[in-house]
Amino acid sequence: MKTMGLLGGMSQTATAEYYRLINERVNQRLGGWNSAEMIISSVNFARIEHCVRNGLWHEGAAYLAAKAQGLERAGADFILCASNTMHRVSDEFMRGLRIPLLHIVDPTGQAIHAQGLTKVGLLGTRPVMASSYLSARYAEKFGIETLVPDADEQVAVDRIIFDELVHRVLRPESKRVYLEIIDRLRARGAQGLILGCTEIFLLVSQSDRPDFPMFDTTTLHVDAAVAMAFEESAS
């Protein structure tokens, strides 16, 4: 089993889910008392939130680069970043490293492509929805067009993530807001939905809209990481 290097703390809630899910999957494979070989570098989320809110991407990249370098020195065989948002600076924080990054878009893009879908909705933080750094990768690597909520809806989605989900606050009224936005994306032609923030799956899941495919970046990333640890194809 390869050793995973997890860039975490973005948020602690998402990182705890990554740790739980990865270890559950490894134990399901190997049984007994087996768990994952994993090194976690958990950052101070306040610093990340400050960089995201103020567009200080280079500062955030430098902060994560030091952490990624530490993971490599500690013996990680590959890195995964438990945040869709901070993949915006993944090229910067991985620069100079010898170990690879398991990019969060790729297992999700593979799953969407496998279902034959070409146009999907995308929910996430405002940088994820308003910028092209993830949607461009979906388009260029997998031929997938992404639809995002309108500007006011993006504000609502982002507020719920930062004010509630990162603190594991799960409110029924916020779930209703998300589902209404999801329904409007579907009405605009979305064939499915990317849960493009690593906490959203705690609030909204496939069971909420059984006939509308949902692609949870957290669990898909976890599955791909476990496959990579066992030197299997992520698909």
Image: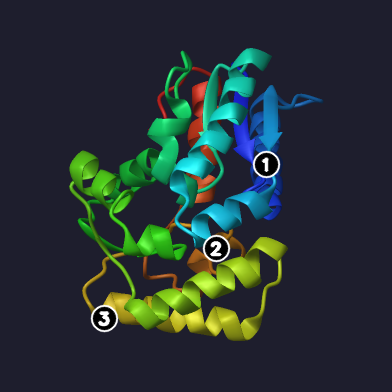
How far is disc 1 from disc 3 in space, using C-alphas? 39 Å
Q: Which mark is residue 6?
A: none
How far is disc 3 from disc 2 in space, using C-alphas? 21 Å
Task: Identify which residue is drawn at 65% across, 71% down.
Answer: 164
Find out whether the residues at labels 1 and 2 contact each other: C-beta distance under 8 Å.
no
Task: Identify which residue is drawn at 57% across, 67% down.
Answer: 161
Depth check: 160 or 201 in front? Answer: 160
Q: Which mark is residue 187?
A: 3
Front: mark 3 or 2? 2
Find out whether the residues at labels 3 and 2 contact each other: C-beta distance under 8 Å.
no
Q: Position of residue 26 (x, y in %)?
A: 66, 29
Q: Quadrant of the C terminus?
A: top left
Q: Is residue 46 left or right of residue 200?
A: right
Residue 50 falls in image quadrant? bottom right
Q: Position of residue 183 (x, y in %)?
A: 36, 80
Residue 194 visible at all? no
Front: mark 1 or 3? 1
Residue 123 visible at all? yes
Depth check: 83 or 30 in front? Answer: 83
First reached walking from the N terminus: tag 1 or tag 2: 1
Q: Amino acid at mark 2?
A: Ile
Q: Is residue 47 left or right of residue 207?
A: right
Q: Which mark is residue 200?
A: 2
First reached walking from the N terminus: tag 3 or tag 2: 3
Q: Which mark is residue 43?
A: 1
